[in-house]
């Protein structure tokens, strides 16, 4: 048996053990090492298939947490009251009419991610993951304020444009 034949056989079935193969492996250390590697790889793959990570398991197998539906319902109620509250409050003030508030909201929403991207760019250039250690796992002050960087400026100018 040649090395090519031996490796084809091992590749097809790492568990294979014919007489011709064993004879070759007894004299060829490289092929013997190849079979050891293939067997350990095969074992790893079998182990991974037997115990899939949580994320790969079918959802039906997991029961949703009992409080989740209540939390969702409470969030919807809370958000409804918040929107209603802002709308009612808006009817009793003059300084920020509805359309201006919408433009301000859209402007801030568009520019906030740009601040985030900008800060990521600066950190990438500086080859660092966080801007500091002030907030532990949350990074430094700049990591918490990156979206505000541009949003404050754009928000100010939109507000200023409408206020005269
Ligand atoms: Zn060989």
Image: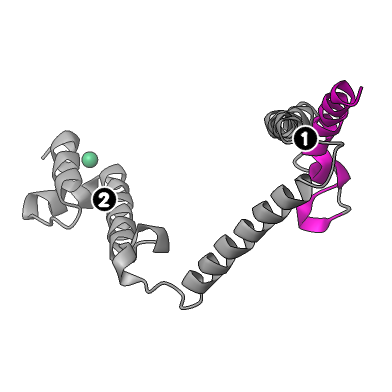
Residue 30: quadrant of the picture: top left
Q: Is ligand 1 closer than 8 angstroms to the Cβ of mark 1?
A: no
Residue at (71% x, 31% y) in the render: 99
- Disc 2 under 8 Å from ligand 1? The reply is no
Mark 2, residue position:
35
144 or 131, nearer to the observer: 144
Left or right, 51 with respect to 129, comes to left
> How was this image coloured?
one colour
**What number is the disc on residue 1?**
none
Q: Magenta residues, as a range?
A: 135-164
Left or right, residue 139 beside residue 73: right
Q: Is residue 119 above or below residue 132?
A: above
- In the picture of the structure, the residue carrying the numbered disc 1 is 97
Q: Nearer the viewer, residue 107 or 151?
A: 107
Do the CB atoms of the residues marked 1 and 2 lie less than 8 Å apart? no
Q: Is residue 159 magenta?
A: yes
* 142 in relation to 115, above or below: below
Q: Quadrant of the C terminus?
A: top right
Question: Residue at 68% of width from left, 29% of height from top?
Answer: 110
Which structural element holds mark 1? loop
- Report the mark closest to the observer, 1 or 2: 1
């Amino acid at each position: 048996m040649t090395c090519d034949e031996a490796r084809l056989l091992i590749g097809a079935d790492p568990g294979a053990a014919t007489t011709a193969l064993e004879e070759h492996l007894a004299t060829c250390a490289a092929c013997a090492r190849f079979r050891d590697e293939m067997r350990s790889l095969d074992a790893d793959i079998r182990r991974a298939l037997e115990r899939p990570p949580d994320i790969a398991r079918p959802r039906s197998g997991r029961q949703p947490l009992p409080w989740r539906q209540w939390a969702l319902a409470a969030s919807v109620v809370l958000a409804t009251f918040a929107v209603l509250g802002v709308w009612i409050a808006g009817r009793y003030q003059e300084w920020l009419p509805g359309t201006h508030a919408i433009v301000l909201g859209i402007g801030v929403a568009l520019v906030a991610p740009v601040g985030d991207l900008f800060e990521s760019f600066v950190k990438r250039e500086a080859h660092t993951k966080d801007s500091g250690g002030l907030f532990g796992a949350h990074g430094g002050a700049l990591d918490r304020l990156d979206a505000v960087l541009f949003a404050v400026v754009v928000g100010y100018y939109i507000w200023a444009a409408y206020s005269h």
